[in-house]
Each structure stands twice: as C-alpha cells, then as structure tokens.
Image (tube, rainbow, N blue to C red):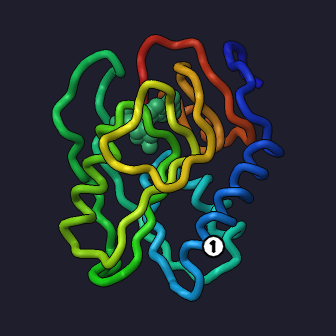
Amino acid sequence: MAEGLKPLYSPEEIRSTIGRLAGEIRADYASRTPILVGVLKGAFVFLADLIRALEMPVEVDFIRLSSYGTRDVPTPKAVITKDIELSVEGRDVLVVEDIIDRGTTIEAVMDHLEGKNPATLRLCTLLLKEGGGTGRKIDYIGKEIGDGFVVGYGMDYKERYRELRALYTIDTKDGGD
Ligand code: 5GP
Ligand code: MG
C-alpha cells in the first residue's frame, strides 16, 4: 500500500456489497435485459464485477465526461466527451457510477440519456458521499461514506491507484475524475 492511503473497504467488503446490489438489481429486472452504462473511467472495475455478480443477461456500454479541476472550484456543467454507442430507445438503462459527490457529473449523464428515450432509466453507485448527492433518485447505493477523497478499485488520484483491489482514502486537497 502506498504511503498516505487509509483503508476504507476491503476486497471482501466490496464483494459482499456488490452481491447485495446484484440481488436488488436482479429482482427488479427479472426477465429483462438492461443496458448497463458505465461512467468512464472510474466505474470500469465496479461494472466488471457487477455484471458477473448479476448472473443475468445484460448489455454493456460506456459514457465519458470531461473532468473538471478541483473539488472546491465551481465548474460549468460537465461535457460528454464519449457518448454511448448502443441505441437505448425503448430499453431499460441502468447507469453505473463509482462515486457520487456533488452530483454534477451524474446529473449530466442522466439528463443526456433521458434525451434518448429509454423505457426506464435508473442509477446505481458504489459509493455516495455524505452531504453530497443529486436531486435525482439513486436507485441502488453500495455504501454511504464520509468526506475523504477515495482511491482504488478503479478510482484514481491523478491517474494513480486504479489497480488497487481495496478502497482507500487519500490525503489531498484537490479532487480528480
Ligand atoms: P461529482 O462531484 O460530480 O458527483 O463527481 C465528480 C467526478 O469526480 C465523478 O466522476 C466522480 O466519480 C469523481 N469523484 C467524486 N469524488 C471522488 C473521490 O473521492 N475519489 C475519486 N477518485 N473520484 C471522485
Ligand atoms: Mg466517476
């Protein structure tokens, strides 16, 4: 483990959280084939484990948004830099995000996808920061956490630490994507 990282959740805790989320999702989408849309880059590890825990047919696509500078600086609405490629019109769409803080990013994603007329549009996040969130309903929440900057399990600080199997908080003043 690199210096300055404090353990948040172990691989076992992540696995059991994903197992619980998968059970909820499986029950809600019985006999349907949702399109899971992962928000790049941070959600790719979570999405990979989630689809295998689901044990039901799914389709997968990705969307990416421009990252903004620091957490403390207000920024304009996030811009989509890579759109999904599947047609979602009339389909069940489940957006899969790693972490929701202020909610700016996920609101841009949800607004954008809503414009493509899916039959249903839901949201799943592994982590939700306390005091953060969005005006939108979050249908599936893995863990609610305190106010530290999280890395590992796909999430980075300046592109580092995505490969770590566990989740950590890191001492830093500025945020990342
Ligand atoms: P928002 O504040 O718009 O909810 O989140 C902005 C972006 O920063 C999102 O892509 C979100 O996944 C990412 N983000 C928010 N908090 C953290 C964090 O603690 N660690 C990392 N690595 N990314 C974060
Ligand atoms: Mg993200």
Is 152 on the left-hand or right-hand side of 98? right
Q: Looking at the image, is 139 positioned above or below residue 126?
A: below
Residue of label 1? 26
Q: Residues within 10 Å of mark 1 (few under 14, many from 20)?
A: some
Q: Residue type at mark 1: give it.
A: Arg
Of the 4 image quadrants, the one containing the N terminus is top right
Q: Which residue is at a point 79% across and 37% down the rendered structure image?
A: 10
Secondary element at tag 1: helix
Q: Looking at the image, is 119 positioned above or below residue 42?
A: below
Q: Looking at the image, is 51 positioned above or below residue 78?
A: below
Q: Which residue is at a point 74% across and 25% down the rendered structure image?
A: 7
Q: Which residue is at a point 54% across and 54% down the rendered structure image?
A: 140
Percent across and percent down for residue 13 are 78, 42
Quarter holding residue 57: bottom right
Q: Looking at the image, is 134 positioned above or below residue 109?
A: above
Please tell me which residue lies in front, 2 or 147: 147
Please tell me which residue lies in front, 128 or 105: 128
Percent across and percent down for residue 51 are 63, 68
Quarter of the rendered image showing ligand 1: top left
> Given the current orientation, which residue lies at the most extreme right position?
12
Quarter holding residue 49: bottom right
